[in-house]
Image (cartoon, grey):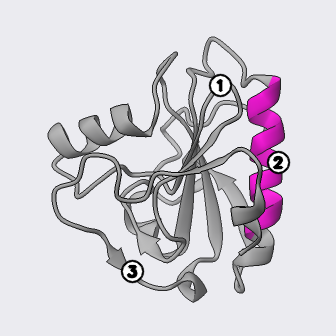
């Protein structure tokens, strides 16, 4: 997998709060990359896992990858995992969340660099890749102001 070669990648699989497990539908089912922002000015995979598990009752953190403000890429799930981040589109979408509230701030240069590198690698790692879309571009989410930046 090409994304595993990224210098800023940190493997957090199985290291954040969980309550159960997500199903694995296989990487061949993944056609889309879903882009999110955290709507918070700080945070990381552990903080998001605490919220997703403790408040939402989900099995674990929603995002396959979280990109911190310093450009660190936190890897949370294997590519085939069907996590909860875009409703009825979860089966075919890999979720990337950039930490930040992009209604009032912009991604850092380090985040933008890591995001571009990650998407470039994932396109090679997803045999059936079709497109990268913002959260608000998925069916049922046009109302949601996410990711609010030109990815």
Numbered disc 3: secondary structure: strand
Q: Quadrant of the N terminus?
A: bottom right
- The answer to which of marks 3 and 1 sits earlier in the sequence is 3
Bin the neighbour count of mark 1 within 10 Å (Cα to Cα): few under 14, some 14-19, many 20 and up.
Answer: many
* Residue bearing mark 1: 69
Q: Nearer the viewer, mark 1 or mark 2?
A: 1
* Quarter of image, res 129: bottom right
The circle drawn on residue 116 is 2
Residue 151 in view, yes or no: no
Q: What residue is shown at x 75% (from left), y 22% (from top)?
A: 108
The first of marks 1 and 2 along the sequence is 1
As drawn, 67 above or below 125: above
Residue ID for mark 3: 24
The image position of residue 98, as x and y in percent, is 60, 36
- Residue stretch rendered in magenta on the structure: 109-122
Secondary structure at numbered mark 2: helix
Determine the image quadrant of residue 99. Answer: top right
Quadrant (top left, top right, bottom left, bottom right) of the C terminus: top right
Residue 115 visible: yes
Residue 110 falls within the magenta-colored stretch: yes
Residue at the spot 62% in from the left edge and 11% down from the top edge: 104
**In the image, residue 47 above or below residue 45:** above
Specify the label residue 46 is tagged with: none
Residue visible at 80% across and 75% down in the picture: 124
The residues bearing labels 3 and 1 have C-alpha atoms spaced at a distance of 29 Å
Which type of secondary structure does the marked residue at label 1 adopt?
A: loop
């Amino acid at each position: 997998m090409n994304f595993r070669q990224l210098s800023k990648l940190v493997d957090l699989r199985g290291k954040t709060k969980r309550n159960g497990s997500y199903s694995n539908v296989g990487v061949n089912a993944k056609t889309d990359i879903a882009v999110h922002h955290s709507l918070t000015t700080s945070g990381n995979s552990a903080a998001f896992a605490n919220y997703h598990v403790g408040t939402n009752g989900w099995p674990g953190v929603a995002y396959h990858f979280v990109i911190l403000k310093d450009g660190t890429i936190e890897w949370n799930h294997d590519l085939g995992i069907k996590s909860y981040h875009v409703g009825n589109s979860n089966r075919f979408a890999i979720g990337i969340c950039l930490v930040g509230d992009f209604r009032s701030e912009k991604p850092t240069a380090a985040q933008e660099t890591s995001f571009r590198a990650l998407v470039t690698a994932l396109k090679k790692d997803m045999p059936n890749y079709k497109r990268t879309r913002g959260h608000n571009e998925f069916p049922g989410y046009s109302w949601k102001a996410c990711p609010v930046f030109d990815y």
